[in-house]
Amino acid sequence: MAEAQRTVAFGSAVGLHARPAATIAKAAGESGHSVTIEAPNGKKANAASVLLLLAMGVSKGDELTLTVSGDDADATADRFAELIGSELDPQ
């Protein structure tokens, strides 16, 4: 099984709260891949779990490590890096 990693700064201005976590979890669930996110504090989460994402305590600019497993892992990792690096909390 292929695996890909990316490091990306979290882009949402107010950190990882319910709305961005739900967006990430939905994308992870729909991707068909295993997606794990690790925060600078060492906490890891299955990206498909809103509750686990919220427990990570991520703030804007935190460098997150994404690990994606599955077929076409590189392309999926690129899509998740773009998603996580963007503003997920519309003004």
Image (spheres, helix red, strand yellow):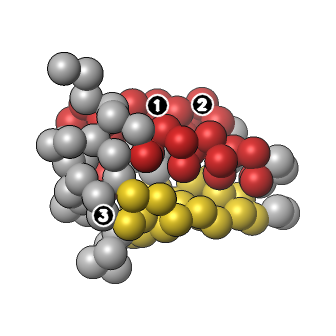
Answer whether labels 2 and 3 touch (C-beta < 8 Å). no
Q: Which residue position is annotated with label 2? A: 30
* Residue kind at label 2, given as amino acid type: Glu
Label 2 crowd (10 A; few <14 / some 14-19 / many >=20): few
Q: Picture coordinates of residue 5 (x, y %)?
A: 64, 66
Q: Picture coordinates of residue 81 (x, y %)?
A: 54, 49
Q: In the structure shown, which secondary structural element does the residue marked by tag 3 occupy?
A: loop
Residue drawn at x 76%, y 53% is 74
Residue drawn at x 30%, y 63% is 62
Answer whether labels 1 and 2 touch (C-beta < 8 Å). yes
75 lies left or right of 48:
right
Is residue 4 visible to the viewer in this orientation of the structure?
yes
61 lies left or right of 28:
left
Q: In the structure shown, which secondary structural element does the residue marked by tag 2 occupy?
A: helix
* Residue kind at label 3, given as amino acid type: Asp
Q: Which residue position is annotated with label 1? A: 26
Is residue 25 visible to the viewer in this orientation of the structure?
no
In the rendering, which numbered label is found on residue 62? 3
Residue drawn at x 34%, y 46% is 11
43 lies left or right of 82:
left
From the image, which quarter does the N terminus lie in? bottom right
Q: In the structure shown, which secondary structural element does the residue marked by tag 1 occupy?
A: helix
* Residue kind at label 1, given as amino acid type: Lys
Residue drawn at x 39%, y 31% is 23
Answer whether labels 1 and 3 touch (C-beta < 8 Å). no
Dot 1 or dot 3: first in sequence order is: 1
Q: Tell me how far mark 1 sits from mark 2, CA to CA.
A: 6 Å
Label 1 crowd (10 A; few <14 / some 14-19 / many >=20): some
Q: Picture coordinates of residue 83 (x, y %)?
A: 49, 38
Q: Picture coordinates of residue 82 (x, y %)?
A: 54, 42
From the image, which quarter does the C terminus lie in? top left
Q: Tell me how far mark 1 sits from mark 3, CA to CA.
A: 21 Å
